[in-house]
Amino acid sequence: MCRGEGRHYVGMRKMVTIGLTGSIRNIFTAKESGPSVPWSIFLAKGEPTTGHGQCAQGKGLMSRLTVSWDERLVGYLYPEEDNLVVFEYADSWLSQGFTAISLSLPTEMKKHGPERSTNFFRNLLIEGPAYWAIMDKTSFDDNVLYDYLTTYGLDCAGALSIGPEGWEDLRPASAYRDVTDQLEALAAKSFKDRPPLLKGLGAKLSIAGAQDKIPLYTKNDRFYLPEDGSNSPTTIIMKIQSDNYKFLVENEYFCLNLADSIGLSVTKSKIITIENTNVLILERYDRAKTEDGTIIRLHQEDFCQALNISPQRKYEEQNGPNFKKCTDLILNSQLNNKYLDLENFIKASIFNYIIGNCDAHGKNYSIIYDNKLTGKRLAPFYDILSTLSYPNLDNNFAMKYGDKNKLYKIKSEEWIKFANDVRISTVDISMTIKNIIKDILNKVDCCLNEILIINRSADIFFDSLYKNICKSIFMLEKEAETIGLNARK
């Protein structure tokens, strides 16, 4: 059955919930329209000449930021020249034997240098148009990264909260503010008049990625933002339709639904309608609820953070993560069930090929930690959609299958190289491909029917997407058969 079984409708002040269930490269790069992105301000330039905690102009010591893990002090963040930061673990964190906040920032070192520190914390920033919308209205000093985290760091991906030292003592009594009416007003605007959600709602929090989205807290069919400075956790991520990429919400929901229906662990999602606009609601897998109803944060880090890679190098073609690096990370990171996690990673990689998800880069895979700070595992998959459905997007896969990243150039020899990269035999890769194809063919019609019930006007779009999936399956089936025949010789 499709994951959407049990579809229900919930009155929501002009909102309808439909189908409860389990990024795009051009947005991320300077290919997009709008102001050119001066990424040079984020690039590490080596060790600074000033000591950590000194301002770049040599004006003396600057204030530090505190880094907390669900309200436990982890350490401190200091500004450096050239838009860098330095991270230092707190003595109290180290003395209690707690885990590192990243595989790239081990606790064996109390203080980490600018390159490693900056790469980790830079990966917490939003990207693309939403970033520039915020920058357009914000006056930051020379250290943009440090100032950004000062303003927007209290609710990030994972369990970390970053803010000025002493912010804990200044929390407002009211933890959340209701923004449901504001959301309705924004959704009613035309694309050209609608600002990015973060800017339109005045949210002071950060969520990595480039799609127009915002973290929210939801209760009783209402939506809330944390009060400024409150550090109150959000529980969902909302994504809204895009003017440039038609049916983006439905595309992601369909692909998540299909992935879930074949047994992949994905973030839970549903589509709701606000003022005749479909929006995607994603349940935050890095949040959990205790028996008394308290919401707690679960720490996570994406593969770029774990591998000490800047977000500007998240694609393999930029010397970023590839299948081999990701496999080594999974096998060497003391995950609770590393072989099962690797198996799921391999299946997700084949699934992404079939649906045409060319944007499965290093930031779209994560490791999640349990609340006891003792175990970790591969996080549910997220940001899964068919980017090949948009002709104006880059159609090169984020990671090469073998030596190729073009769909039609990935033949049996490339899949054999892929098998070597992910450490499985040619027989196993042939069987895995065949099984995934079988599962998709058994589930795709059900998932298509569900999404067309949600939005019948998307029939032409999904007819094209379905044909692309069938073409991919046809090509891949032949290559899997060739691999299997050669393996048996």
Image (spheres, helix red, strand yellow):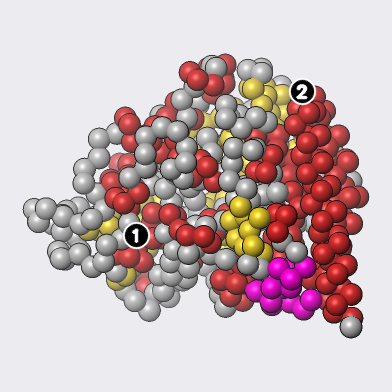
Q: State the mark number for residue 403.
A: none
What's the residue type where badge 2 is placed?
Ser
Disc 2, SS: helix
Instruction: Name the residue at 47% across, 30% down.
Output: 196
Residue 270 lies in quadrant: top right
Q: Secondary structure at mark 1?
A: helix
Percent across and percent down for residue 280 are 64, 35
Q: Answer few, some or many: residues within 10 Å of disc 1's Cα (few below 14, many 20 plus, some between 14 and 19).
A: many
Quarter of the image where the C terminus is located: bottom right
Residue ID at (66%, 34%): 249
Which residue is identified by label 2?
A: 457
Quickly name the residue at label 1: 118
Whether residue 155 is in magenta: the answer is no
- How many marks overall? 2
Vertical relation: 160 (above or below) 449: below
Tell me the distance, in whole angstroms, between the alpha carbons under discs 2 and 1: 45 Å
**Chief secondary structure of the magenta portion:** helix
Q: Residue at x 72, y 29 (%)?
A: 17
- Tell me, yes or no, if residue 240 can be seen here: yes
Name the residue at 25% across, 40% down. 140
- Residue 374, percent across and down? 55, 71
Quadrant in the rendering for residue 454: top right
Q: Position of residue 317 (x, y in %)?
A: 51, 60
Part of the protein shown in magenta: 412-426
Of 95 and 284, the residue lying toward us: 284
- Dot 1 amino acid type: Thr
Judge whether residue 425 is colored magenta: yes
Question: Residue extending furthest bottom?
Answer: 489
Residue 7 in view here:
no
Residue 161 horizontal side relative to residue 331, left or right: left
Taking depth in this image into account, of 311 and 290 the one nearest to the observer is 311
